[in-house]
Image (spheres, rainbow, N blue to C red):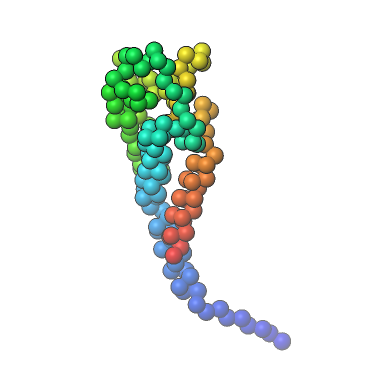
Amino acid sequence: MQITLQAFGFTEAIKTLKNAQTSISDTQPLMIELSNHLYNISMDSFEDGRTPDGKAWTPLKESTLKYKSTAKMLYNEGDLQGKFIQSASKDEASVGTSATYKGFPYPVVMQFGKDDGSVPARAFMPIDSNGKLYGGVEKELQDIVIKFVESALN
């Protein structure tokens, strides 16, 4: 006795998988979306005066307020936010700032503070001092990637 099984209807499934392969191989739209998300998180930190994980920044000292033109934290002449950059390629999504003061990359000090405690950390980018993404942000980025793959299958 011989049993023969024939399957039909795989033509559409194969077509869907081929289309998904083509869509997924063009990752630049995904990288742009990831870069935009990271950029928005950082800009929200400046606007809210909070770290990307929601902790309020340490208030400015009175001595600092005396020489600043504004009480707004991490803002003097707008270089830090004004020189914020984002970029994306097919393999990379990045955000950062090119701001310097007399050649000194002060955004690093603003992000992580000084070891001696004279400048408190006021994180505006969603990374810790070890270069790791904050847990919630990592999950958000993973969700964006999952939606990108799922949309390629639909």
Residue 41 visible within the image:
yes
The residue under the point 56% across, 78% down is 7
In the rendered view, tell whether residue 151 sits above or below residue 57: below
Q: How many marks?
A: 0
The residue under the point 49% across, 36% down is 54
Image coordinates of residue 118 in percent, x first then y, are 47, 14
Outermost residue, bottom direction?
1
Residue 127 visible within the image:
no
The residue under the point 35% across, 29% down is 97
75, 141: nearer the viewer: 75
* Quadrant for the C terminus in the image: bottom left
The residue under the point 36% across, 45% down is 32
111, 54: nearer the viewer: 54
* Quadrant for the N terminus in the image: bottom right
Image coordinates of residue 136 in percent, x first then y, are 52, 42
Image coordinates of residue 103 in percent, x first then y, are 32, 16
